[in-house]
Image (tube, rainbow, N blue to C red):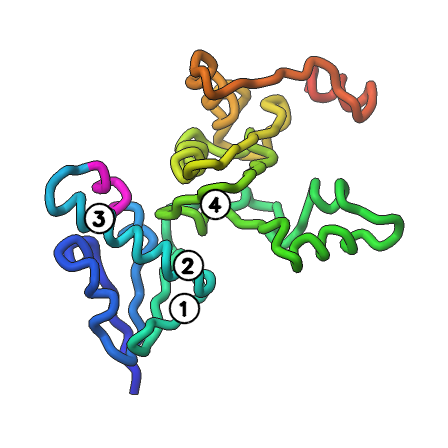
Amino acid sequence: MAKTYILDTNVLLHDPKSIFAFQDNEVVIPLAVVEEIDTQKKRQDEIGRNARSVSRILDQLRSLGKLSKGVPLHQGGRLRVEVNHQEAIDFPKGLDPERYDNLEYLFRDGSETFTVLDEFINRGIIEMETLTHIRGRSIPNQFIICDEAQNLSPNMIKTLVTRVGEGTKIVFTGDPEQIDHPYLDASSNGLTYLVERLKAEEISGHVTLTKGERSVVAEMGARLL
């Protein structure tokens, strides 16, 4: 009967290959452990080297599928990253993570709302992920769009920006005046934080739109309510 082994930070930093040491059993790594290991990668000692090795192993295993759902290990057994019961980096309450939202509108094709978008997803041109699943990853040679960034906290923004690998460009869009998150406002949200912290950097830039396009009523509501 297969058993489940949960690996903590100390085990992985001592031996990154311990992931493969449990034969036909299931290996579980809590997301909090992945986050802790990520903070150690800049160290120049053995702990830092092992932290980087763990990240490389996880990146290689991601090619087999989503770690949150589990992937097979070459010696047998499975690895799964447990993302439940962690500090939430997730959709605000009331928003459905299964909805396409703005992409649903942009890629609509007449009455067949999802035809174009589904085709792009099936062909691998577009890949949609929640922030929950990107910690510990490096994302090279991609074009990333983070929509509704005003609903992210500064920590969530940092999590996404620090995943960007070589050759990747990232675009954040949002309206700081239209925030659905109960604990953020126009000055404390992640999009405003990002613009303020990076505005002097040569490799970044931002555009501020001063006029709404939806309607005069919508613009008035955003400004006054």
Q: Residue at x 22, y 48 (%)?
A: 51
Of all residues, the one furthest to the right in this rendering is 110
Camera-nearest residue between 152 and 144: 144
Which residue is tagged 1? 71
Residue type at tag 2: Arg
Highlighted range, magenta? 36-42
Q: Say which element carries label 3.
A: helix
Q: How far separated are the C-alphas under marks 3 and 1?
A: 20 Å
Which residue is tagged 4? 131
Which x, y percent locates residue 165? 41, 39
Q: Say which element carries label 2.
A: helix
**Res 197 → quadrant:** top left
Q: How far separated are the C-alphas under marks 3 and 4?
A: 21 Å
Q: Residue at x 56, y 45 (%)?
A: 93
Query: Would you place residue 132 above or below residue 166 in this image?
Result: below
Residue type at tag 3: Ala
**Res 70 → quadrant:** bottom left
Q: Which quadrant: the C terminus? A: top right
Image position of 145 (left or right of 153):
right
Q: Earlier in the sequence, mark 4 or mark 2?
A: 2
Which x, y percent locates residue 98? 63, 54
Q: Earlier in the sequence, mark 3 or mark 4?
A: 3
Query: Would you place residue 34 above or below residue 170 in this image?
Result: below
Which residue is tagged 3? 51
* Residue count near mark 3 (Cα–Cα under 10 Å), binned few <14, some 14–19, many ≥20: many
Which x, y percent locates residue 155? 39, 33
Q: Which mark is residue 62?
A: 2
Q: Residue at x 14, y 38 (%)?
A: 44
Q: Earlier in the sequence, mark 3 or mark 2?
A: 3
Contact between labelled residues 2 and 1, with CB atoms less than 8 Å apart: yes
Residue type at tag 1: Val
Q: Earlier in the sequence, mark 3 or mark 1?
A: 3
